[in-house]
Amino acid sequence: MGEKAATLGRVVTTVLEYQDVHVTAADGTELLHGIDLTVPDGRLTVLAGASGSGKSTLLRLANRLEVPSTGRVLVRGQDVSELDPLVLRRRVGMVFQRPTPFAGSVRENLRVAEPTADEAALGDTLARVGLDPDMLDRVADDLSGGEAQRMCLARTLLTGPQLVLMDEVTSSLDPPARREIEGLAQDLVADGLTVVWVTHDLAQAERIADDTVVLVDGRCASADERTRFLADRSEEDGER
Amino acid sequence: MSTTAIGWGGLVASLTLVAVAVALSGWQRLHLTRTILWSSARAAAQLLAVGVALALVLDPDASLVWSWLWVVAMVAFAGITVRNRAREAPGIFGLAVLSMATVVTVSLGVIFGLGIFPVEGRTIIPMAGMMIGNSMTSCVLVARRIVGELSDKRDEVEARLALGQAWPVASRPYVRAALRTALIPQIESTKSVGLVFLPGAMTGLILAGVDARDAVVVQLAIMYLVLGSVATSVTVIGLGLTRRLFTPDHRLRPLDRASQ
């Protein structure tokens, strides 16, 4: 679309845009109520919100694992409904909440994403996510949670995405593994990729976000709601 | 050949074993007495009605059209049965009917095309019945397994879709597992036949006074046909159902496992 927006004093391009997006579930419940949102290129944007606020649904619209009831979702100015979903999904990669290793070795997992990748490319991609390139022969199901999630990220990176969607990717990991994945997401942004990161963890959002969007009950929060959400979460964090 | 007709007296005598089942249920307080009695009575009523109808259809003077209509009815009832037992599988009735029709066409085509049996009412109906009966069980199993596998492994399937795999590729490992699960019981049954159990058709022929070697040959032909029929029906259901579980734009539809 080529729309330019000025953010923090520098000119950035919009990579992902939601225009009056509504999503209604099969049972008639409306999950998203008219979302208007732009995600700038080359930054780490966090979608924060409580459980059930619609942040994962919003994320899954970007690679057409969900489709809007009404409204449009644009990736680099192109309506995703007009794109071949298989091509779109290689441009807009996604890592899921729980690690999803497939049966077989790490090599076989990576080759699901890129069947023609040579050994050097596979090793380089593992190294990029902080894994030992020599672990290609390990059985994917034997990896620790943190290793498996990093392998899943490597698998996604092999498709050459411009935008990476990360849906609560650290929620099943221990704190050290969580920090490692957060660091990797920031490294991807430093390498020029765009990351959209979903979390309900406010402290995490504060640690990693370039921009934060708060969702409340399927809507982008107003200034008041955002303040209230941040205050509520801070209280909850303080009580833990 | 000597024939074995047990007569009404023999049938009544066989009820002794139903009495044993009722007695065991009462002794162990299983609360199954009414169910056992009802099942036994229902089986008698159903089979007697079928026997009367079959006698009319299989009459040597009756037209073969009646036999083929009987097969059509069996296909329809099989479709209803599969739908009732695998309600979580969308559109399963149509698929089951298609699957059974394919099985009947292929198996009876082989049986009559190759001259294994003559084209008569007494061969059309029992052969179609055996193919449909065995296929029906496997169809229920594969339909439930496919919905179950794709539901349980939704995260993995969506991860594959998110990597740009088309739905037939993304679903293949899980559908393959379901097909194997549905086919293995039939393969195991084929392997163990004669060693562990004597199959029904062969037992029936021997009881009817047919030479055991002739009965074995008939049974072998039937078993091979049943194996082929089950493989055919399971594949038709597997491919057709999987297509229905995905949208044309490669998304996995919401799946309902509540009834499992």
Image (cartoon, rainbow, N blue to C red):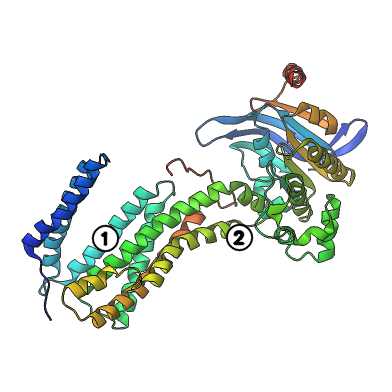
Q: Amino acid at mark 1?
A: Met
Dot 1 lies on which element?
helix
Using the numbered discs, state the Cα–Cα distance from disc 2 to disc 1 in whole angstroms: 35 Å
Q: Amino acid at mark 2?
A: Val
Decide if residue A70 is on the left or right side of residue B225: right
Residue A69, by quadrant, is top right
- Image position of B54 with respect to A20: above or below: below
Residue A173: image location, x then y, percent:
74, 39
**Residue at the spot of label 1:** B74
Query: Which mark identifies residue A38?
Result: none
Does mark 1 fall on the same chain as mark 2?
A: yes
The answer, for residue B172, to whether it is visible in the render is yes
- Identified at 42% across, 42% down, the residue is B259
Badge 2, how many Cα within 10 Å: few under 14, some, many 20+?
few
- Quadrant housing the C terminus of chain A: top right
The answer, for residue A210, to whether it is visible in the render is no
Decide if residue A124 is on the left or right side of residue A228: right
**Residue at the spot of label 2:** B169
- Quadrant housing the N terminus of chain A: top right
- Identified at 19% across, 46% down, the residue is B23
Badge 1, how many Cα within 10 Å: few under 14, some, many 20+?
many
Chain letter of mark 2 equals B
- Image position of A153 with respect to B51: above or below: above
Residue A160: image location, x then y, percent:
79, 54
- Identified at 71% across, 31% down, the residue is A36
In this orientation, which residue lies closer to the viewer: B167 or B17? B17
Decide if residue A113 is on the left or right side of residue A186: left
Residue A46, by quadrant, is top right
Residue A209: image location, x then y, percent:
83, 32
Dot 2 lies on which element?
helix
Which of marks 1 and 2 precedes in the sequence? 1
Residue B16: image location, x then y, percent:
14, 54
